[in-house]
Image (cartoon, coloured by chain):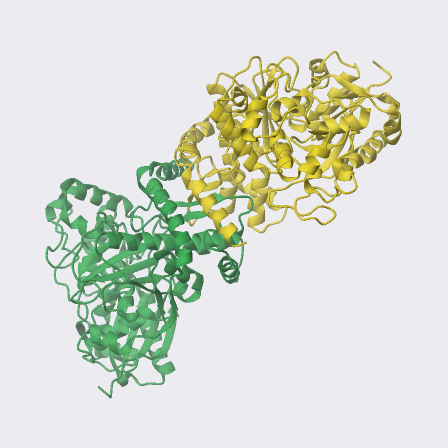
Chain colours: A green, B yellow
């Protein structure tokens, strides 16, 4: 255990990648290298100038390779260690971020003659242009009573694998036919590191409607939705390696460029939100793990499968081997607060001012109530056509009161998700929160505690996902018997703990009752109000084009 | 008709008074003198330092006298005319603005020993501290099935005469007992000018629940609500002069200070919103007159009485002799826009920028819908405990889109009021709009036209109320046979006309259907949502005191 005590975790986010060197003996973070993507999110035009439609969001695979090749040597250097002290490497990427490649694993967007074809490029998780495909897949699944839907809260997302794949099949058959595979960026990166294609089961289960027990939805289902589409496994494959296993070793060529020894163990790919669970030191059931940034991803480990509405998905071994992994989330969090600051025309320091002002206000004293649906509702309504709402405005309403109402709206949304788990028998006794807002907004964390009535723990690390990726790298290298052992050995200390205040909770119970009524009215029984506004807006914009 | 062709109108607003010299031969405005009130609105502490409670709003009668004594000589000088060329004087004041006086007409707040008693001061229209009294008066009236309520849309307001009077009786019996009368500021000012007490019927009907046919509500009713209160006419009187008559002539002493001849005709007092109807050149039925400023007052003339819900009141001869006058309104208009600009942290030029930006947006294209209940809803719900709402917010919502949604919310509120008249048989074919926003916001006026489907006319004058007051002064002096003749002779030209755009109207019909559903849900069937938030806020603030 002594000569190679370090592991590297590489976390590929939306705007940049982060390389962490972790001491697997202590959990200490030795160095972090941050490498921004040159092209960031490609959402207006391809690098060659080809314009993109509404709701498109692409990335450049060369940017990901730069993270590896610039970031790993930099992090090693900053940590003051040699590459031969590294036992293993793990990667995590946003998901569902998927790209078409040829049989050699070359992204089609790199191939001459295809660079100006938008569908040849990697589609980022937040590419939403395939919504019509998702709508049709949902409709047909409901009509046919497809059982797989119940694993996904009753509805699949336009962000997922098949909507993005069928979008290519519908709109650029040449690219579709040229692709040998259409795979998650995380699996593609592992392929680049090891030289072997090795897809993992996590995204297959959460994003490609696959399950270990039932496989993929039937060919008949896809044919009913899109006659002629053919075998759904054609570009996806059928063999998926479980999380926590070794995908292979670094190729000699790649190893040299990364300044690591050839053969260094590489874990199967993973997803940023899911690796955050072991990254945050969580391996047990009953804990609600919230990764709070631009949006919120919630993860829960369960000892059994409960198929329930209102979640994003449930999969066996989906997060940690041996447990059922549940996913849920909120669509606009940091994004919504940034919107408010931008709307007020204030600079970055406005966050601190607003947090300070909002912290001085007593629970219930704003008289305001917001619904955080500024980017739709992910859980528990799974409706991208919902929009944000503010009630209770008066001539005396101050910016810091509205800001507090927005923070409360996030917390009420959080409670509603937790209540949904609870009502379906998945009990939760603690929140573990990580991500930018968990670190920077003590008020938000106190609201999570007060409104949910549960203690909140924030681990002392800004590198939770990269920690998780590094732990999987260490497991792949055999430094730990399994990921559970890795978590126990490296669990980060808690930076802060928040206890629910019963007096605040009593006030918020009253507000939450109103929230719940409003949520169910505008999100369900009277959903035509918000849907109608959105439809009028779309009609108007279509006419004015 | 030749030697005294001018009339003076004095308009007493909330923050200042305005003196207009009008040429009654042509309708030309010769001069305007604006005199700000030194104490403006007294809402935190009396001039002597005595603190005031929440929702108090007082004024200083000395400020009103300064308007007369400084403003009239100034306006005469600016107009370049002598006082003996003035035929008559009319005044209008905000209402219900009421004060207690002794038998000589001296305001109790001027009397030594009473200056530090808040109830001795004039209560401004927007003094809302008597809400509990209004609530009780409404409750008992409903329980007893009092017929008078049907003249007031089913509900009396805390701003009116008896809530403010009974508040004194409950809280400062000494002031109540010392007062010989409790009267409208407009009647007090006429008393100061002529030396004789002469109360008019307009405020008696609209604010003191009196009608020419039925008199006051019964003594039994008041006793049921407030045992021991006694005769409701004790401080109000029972004789009320009709609008359009002469109250008397200027006393010698007063005339000298005003630089007018003694005996100059003075019209009976009047109210700023009501005088705006003849001031705007309106004397016919079927026209919806909107005075659009901080809030909106709507006036309609009708040939018959229709008792309907959702209006502020209806009274025979209440606005113009021979017709039924209807009043309705919206509680937060300019106030709401000022709130938005203040919340954005912008300066005064933001209005022009926001109007320009909002004007470029197509109908329906914001996807937003607001309810303008930032200061409650006056018509058609008459509920001060409602609060503002914004629906449809997204991460892309821009300030000018929200601003447009607020302007649209005013216009939807306006349409709802007009629809209410229509549904009760009071037909309306045109809007005549005046006041600051009518002059400054062409977008708001176009929205009024597009959303209501009716043409909008904005008279070319910033002095509509003072014009109306001057016309009553001219009628009192005998220059016209009646106010109708005065209106016909002096009608101001139209500065702008707005025609409804059918294409915009078609889009707004769709949005209005959603507005109407939301309005009825949050304002009626699910009113507990907004009321609940307000109650929680009040409870929280009470506890933290």
Q: Which residue is more in the foreground, B480 or A415?
A: A415
Q: Is residue B125 left or right of residue B87?
A: left
Considering only vertical position in the picture, is B403 above or below A86? above
Tell me if I can see residue A336 in this picture: no
Judge left or right: residue A23 versus residue B183: left
**In this view, which residue lies farthest toward the front?**
B228
- Closer-to-camera residue (A79/A386): A386
Residue drawn at point x = 39 percent, y = 48 percent: A510
Q: Residue furthest bottom?
A: A3
Quadrant (top left/top right/bottom left/bottom right) for the C terminus of chain A = top left
Seen in the image, is B170 located left or right of residue A241? Answer: right
Q: Nearer the viewer, residue A208 or B15?
A: B15
In the figure, is residue B473 to the left or right of B543?
right
**Measuring 35% from the left and 41% from the top, which residue is drawn there?**
A522
Q: Position of residue A422 (x, y in %)?
A: 25, 54
**Looking at the image, which residue is at 31% across and 48% down?**
A129
Vertical position of residue A536 compared to residue A215: above or below: above
Q: How many marks?
A: 0
Q: Quadrant of residue B503?
A: top left
Q: Nearer the viewer, residue B222 or A96?
A: B222
Task: Pick the quarter of the image with the N terminus of chain A.
Answer: bottom left
Camera sees residue B462:
yes
Could you say where residue B432 lies in the image, as x and y percent from the top left? 60, 24
Place of residue A155 in the rendered image (x, y in percent of width and height, measured from the top left): 23, 47
Q: How far across and how far down the image is residue A110, in percent? A: 28, 62
């Amino acid at each position: 255990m002594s000569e190679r005590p370090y592991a590297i975790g590489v976390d590929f986010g939306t705007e940049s990648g982060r390389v962490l060197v972790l001491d697997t003996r202590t959990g200490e973070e030795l160095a972090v290298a941050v490498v921004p993507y040159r092209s960031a999110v490609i959402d207006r035009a391809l690098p060659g100038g080809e314009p993109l439609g509404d709701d498109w969001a692409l990335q450049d695979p060369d940017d990901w390779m730069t993270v590896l090749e610039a970031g790993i040597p930099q992090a090693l250097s900053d940590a003051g260690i040699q590459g031969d002290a590294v036992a293993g490497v793990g990667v995590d990427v946003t998901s569902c971020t998927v790209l078409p490649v040829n049989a050699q694993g070359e992204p089609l967007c790199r191939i001459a003659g295809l660079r100006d074809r938008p569908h040849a490029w990697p589609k980022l998780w937040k590419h939403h242009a395939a919504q019509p495909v998702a709508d049709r897949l949902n409709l047909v699944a409901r009509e046919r009573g497809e059982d797989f839907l119940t694993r996904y809260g009753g509805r699949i997302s336009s962000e997922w694998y098949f909507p993005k794949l069928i979008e290519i099949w519908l709109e650029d058959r040449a690219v579709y036919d040229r692709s040998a595979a259409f795979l998650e960026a995380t699996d593609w990166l592992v392929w680049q590191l090891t030289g072997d294609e090795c897809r993992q089961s996590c995204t297959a289960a959460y994003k490609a409607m696959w399950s270990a027990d039932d496989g993929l939805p039937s060919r008949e289902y896809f044919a009913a939705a899109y006659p002629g589409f053919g075998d759904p496994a054609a570009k996806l494959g059928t063999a998926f390696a479980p999380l926590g296993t070794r995908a292979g070793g670094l190729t000699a060529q790649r190893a040299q460029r990364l300044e690591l020894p050839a053969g260094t163990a590489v874990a199967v790919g993973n997803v940023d939100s899911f690796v955050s669970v072991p990254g945050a030191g969580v391996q047990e059931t009953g804990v609600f793990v919230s990764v709070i940034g631009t949006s919120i991803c919630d993860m829960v480990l369960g000892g059994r499968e409960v198929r329930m509405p209102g979640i994003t998905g449930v999969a066996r071994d989906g997060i940690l081997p041996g447990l059922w992994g549940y996913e849920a989330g909120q669509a606009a969090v940091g994004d919504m607060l940034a919107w408010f600051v931008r709307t007020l025309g204030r600079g970055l320091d406005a966050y601190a001012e607003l947090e300070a002002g909002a912290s001085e206000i007593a629970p219930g004293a704003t008289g305001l109530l917001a619904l955080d649906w500024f980017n739709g509702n992910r859980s528990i309504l799974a409706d991208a056509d919902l929009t944000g709402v503010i009630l209770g405005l008066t001539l005396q309403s101050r910016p810091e009161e509205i800001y507090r109402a927005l923070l409360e709206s996030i917390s009420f949304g959080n409670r509603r998700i937790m209540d949904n788990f609870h009502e379906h028998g998945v009990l939760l006794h603690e929140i573990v929160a990580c991500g930018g807002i968990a670190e920077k907004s003590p008020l938000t964390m106190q609201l999570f505690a007060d409104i949910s009535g549960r203690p909140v723990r924030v681990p002392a690390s800004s590198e939770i996902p990269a920690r998780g990726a590094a732990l999987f790298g260490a497991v792949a290298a055999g430094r730990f018997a399994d990921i559970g052992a890795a978590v126990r050995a490296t669990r980060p200390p808690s930076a802060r703990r928040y206890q629910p205040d019963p007096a605040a909770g009593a006030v918020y119970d009253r507000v939450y009752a109103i929230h719940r009524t409003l949520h169910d009215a505008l999100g369900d029984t009277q959903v035509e109000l918000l849907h109608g506004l959105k439809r009028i807006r779309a009609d108007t914009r279509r006419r004015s084009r």
